[in-house]
Image (cartoon, helix red, strand yellow):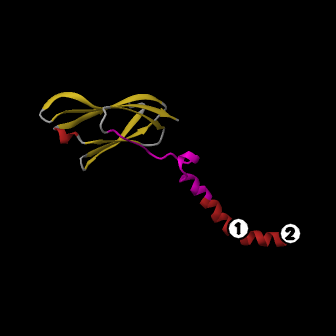
Amino acid sequence: MLHGCKRALRRKFPFLLILGLLAAQGCSIMPSWVGGDPGPTELTVDGEQTFEETAYVGVPLTLDMRDPKLSGYVFAGVAFDPALLRLDSVLEEDFRARYVFMPLRAGRGVVEVRIRDREGGPLETYKLVQVTVEE
C-alpha cells in the first residue's frame, strides 16, 4: 500500500510543483485590493498646484506633469528631503515631464517642483506635493 502511494505521488509531483510555482508567482501579480503588491505610485499633477499623495517605502513614486515650456517657462529644479526620498530620474518627452522618486523611509515631506521664466526671472513654485511615506 505504501509503495502505491509513493508511485502516485511521484506521478503527481511535477504537476504539484508547477501548481505551487504558479501560485507563488500569482501572489506577486494579485491586485492590491486582495493583498497583492500595490505597484508603483503614479500621480498626475495637472491643473492644480498643490497635491497630497501616500507612497510606500521601496515602491517608486512618479509625478507626471505638463511641461511648462508650453507657457514660456522652464524647469528650474526640485526640492525635497533626501533622507525621505531619492530622485531616480527625470524624463521629459511629448510635452510631459515625469519625476521618479524612491521613498527611503517612513515619514512626511514636501516635493516642490520649481520653474522660472524662459528669459530668467525669479524661481516660482510649479507643483507642491505633500508626500506621506508608509512602510
Q: Is residue 107 above or below residue 19?
A: above
**Element at label 1:** helix
Whether residue 88 sits left or right of residue 7 in the image: it is left
Horizontal and vertical percent position of residue 134: 50, 34
Could you classify mark 2 by the number of other residues whose Cα lies within 10 Å: few (under 14), some (14-19), or many (20 or more)?
Answer: few
Q: Residue furthest left?
A: 119
Query: Secondary structure beneath disc 2?
Result: helix
Mark seen at residue 2: 2
Crowdedness of circle 1 by 10 Å Cα count: few (<14), some, many (20+)? few
Q: Say which of 8 and 44 sits in front.
A: 44
Along the polypeptide, which appears first: circle 1 or circle 2?
Answer: 2
Q: Answer whether residue 80 is visible to the viewer in this image.
A: no
Residue in the picture at 57% in, 56% down: 26
Q: Is residue 13 left or right of residue 47?
A: right
The residue identified by callout 1 is: 13
- Quadrant in which the N terminus appears: bottom right
The span shown in magenta is 23-45
Question: Residue 125 magenta-drawn?
Answer: no
Under mark 2, the amino acid is Leu
Outermost residue, right side: 1
Q: Judge whether 89 appears above or below 110 on screen.
A: below
Q: Are the residues at dot 1 and dot 2 in contact (C-beta closer than 8 Å)? A: no
Task: Pinpoint residue 29: horizontal percent, then vertical percent.
Answer: 53, 54
Where, by quadrant of the figure, is residue 103 drawn?
top left
